[in-house]
Image: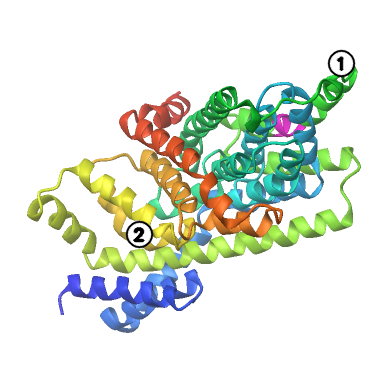
């Protein structure tokens, strides 16, 4: 049996196990371990074992629990609620202002947590009911929450980019910095769409009534101070890292400690908040470690078969495809898989194939990591089985139907596709900041 046939059997076996509802790390890790033993006998045990040791020795992985803990502390202590009150007061007088404030809230929540699910939960429970009560169009604001939550895996500290960094063997710090400008650019494009749409159709996002805008300046400044606290925490964490004063792991520890102290200073650090934060941090960190371990084991076997070289030869030599055509086909496959898989599952499934192929084609793997995160988030929001669509259905008020949710996302998907094309055409959007910081 040729190595190409073995590689196809491995890939199809993994997909079959995933379709039967097996856990991602179990399906991928089992196929990798069984294939290793079948190919190389008892010596094949060394492949998953060496992958486990590689994972345990990967020092930047310590950032994962730190940032997750920071996010849960800020979320559970209701500091995120202060953010929305600030945006409500300062942006309310503008047409569509609360929707614009929701995008700002999502950007800051992303910087606090690094998970799109957290942004979705906060947006659906805090922002969405208030927007509907203020007379905003339900389809537009549903799309706003979903689009804003997509920034969670792009704006640092992105937990998914930590996973990509481990699998692609790229520096986490460079990937996070590469996500800054694309994330802010997408947020600005969302805001621009909201401003234009509400100017053309004012009934979609009415401004706050005058009596509600008549708030003393002292109260506005108080809310501004409370809402800016997460920005101060983020700055305390990222400024030393960007300037080279601390390592990535040290910065993550500063962020977690600063969030903890801030919650205590505001009198919101109860035993319940601490217990929930620690439990959720442990659960999510362990989940990601198992997934990384399984992906490394599967990828080691896949690389050992030479499957990547065979596929590279198929596309470039036999089919004569241009490298950019191959890259576009990869992105289209992510869009397809995103209709029924989450971002971590997609990455783990295709990383053994795509990451070495992208490198062989001469593309930058840090830049490709940004393309991957944007494409998977587009896939998350694409019917019929987009992951974010069903999360929104579970969290949205009863008056918002699944049809409303489906109809809400198309303008924002178009905006995200425009952002993806811009970053593909101008890689410097993603690469300038990491090149500047690490080139100093």
Whether the magenta-drawn stretch holds residue 403 is answered as no
Q: Is 191 situated left or right of 273 in this image?
A: left
Q: SS for tag 1?
A: helix
Q: Residues within 10 Å of mark 2 (few under 14, many from 20)?
A: some
Q: Nearer the viewer, residue 204 or 63?
A: 204
Specify how the rendered protein is coloured: rainbow
* Mark number, residue 217: 1
Q: Residues within 10 Å of mark 1 (few under 14, many from 20)?
A: few
Q: Residue at x 46, y 42 (%)?
A: 413
Which residues make up the magenta segment? 228-233
Q: x, y percentage for residue 360?
A: 23, 48
Q: Nearer the viewer, residue 106 or 10?
A: 106
Whether the magenta-drawn stretch holds residue 232 is answered as yes
Q: Nearer the viewer, residue 89 or 258?
A: 89
Where does the N terminus fall, quadrant-wise? bottom left
Q: SS for tag 2?
A: helix
In the image, residue 173 sits, relative to residue 401, either above or below, namely: above
């Amino acid at each position: 049996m040729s190595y190409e046939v073995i590689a196809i059997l491995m890939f199809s076996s993994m997909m079959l196990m995933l379709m039967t509802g097996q856990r991602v790390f179990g399906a991928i890790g089992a196929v990798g371990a069984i294939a290793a033993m079948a190919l190389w006998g008892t010596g094949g045990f060394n492949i998953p074992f060496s992958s486990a040791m590689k994972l345990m020795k990967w020092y930047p992985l310590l950032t994962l629990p730190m940032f997750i803990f920071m996010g849960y502390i800020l979320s559970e202590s209701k500091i995120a609620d202060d953010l929305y009150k600030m945006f409500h007061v300062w942006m309310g007088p503008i047409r569509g202002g609360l929707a614009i404030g929701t995008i700002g809230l999502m950007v800051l929540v992303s910087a606090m947590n690094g998970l799109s699910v957290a942004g979705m939960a906060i947006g659906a429970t805090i922002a969405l009911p208030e927007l509907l009560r203020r007379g905003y169009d339900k389809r537009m604001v549903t799309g706003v929450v979903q689009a804003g939550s997509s920034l969670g895996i792009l704006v640092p500290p992105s937990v998914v980019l930590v996973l990509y960094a481990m699998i692609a063997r790229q520096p986490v710090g460079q990937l996070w910095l590469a996500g800054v400008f694309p994330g802010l650019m997408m947020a600005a494009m969302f805001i621009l769409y909201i401003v234009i749409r509400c100017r053309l159709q004012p009934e979609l996002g009415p401004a706050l009534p005058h009596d509600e805008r008549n708030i003393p300046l002292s109260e506005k400044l108080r809310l501004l101070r409370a809402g800016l606290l997460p920005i101060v925490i983020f700055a305390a964490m990222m400024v030393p890292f960007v300037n080279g004063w601390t390592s990535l792991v040290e910065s993550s520890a500063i962020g977690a400690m600063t969030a903890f102290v801030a919650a205590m200073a505001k009198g919101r650090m109860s035993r319940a908040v601490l217990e929930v934060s620690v439990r959720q941090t442990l659960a999510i960190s362990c989940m990601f470690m198992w997934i990384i371990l399984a992906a490394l084991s599967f990828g080691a076997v896949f690389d050992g078969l030479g499957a990547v070289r065979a596929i590279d030869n198929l596309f470039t030599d036999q089919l004569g495809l241009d490298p950019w055509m191959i890259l576009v086909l990869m992105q289209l496959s992510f869009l397809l898989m995103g209709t029924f898989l989450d971002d971590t599952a997609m990455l783990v499934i295709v990383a053994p194939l795509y990451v070495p192929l992208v490198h062989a084609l001469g593309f930058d793997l840090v830049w490709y990591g940004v393309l991957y995160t944007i494409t998977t988030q587009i896939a998350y929001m694409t019917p019929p089985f987009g992951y974010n669509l069903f999360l929104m259905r579970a969290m949205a008020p009863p008056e918002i139907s699944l049809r409303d949710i489906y109809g809400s996302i198309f303008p924002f998907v178009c905006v995200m596709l425009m952002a993806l094309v811009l970053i593909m055409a101008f890689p410097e959007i993603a690469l300038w900041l990491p090149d500047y910081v690490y080139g100093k």
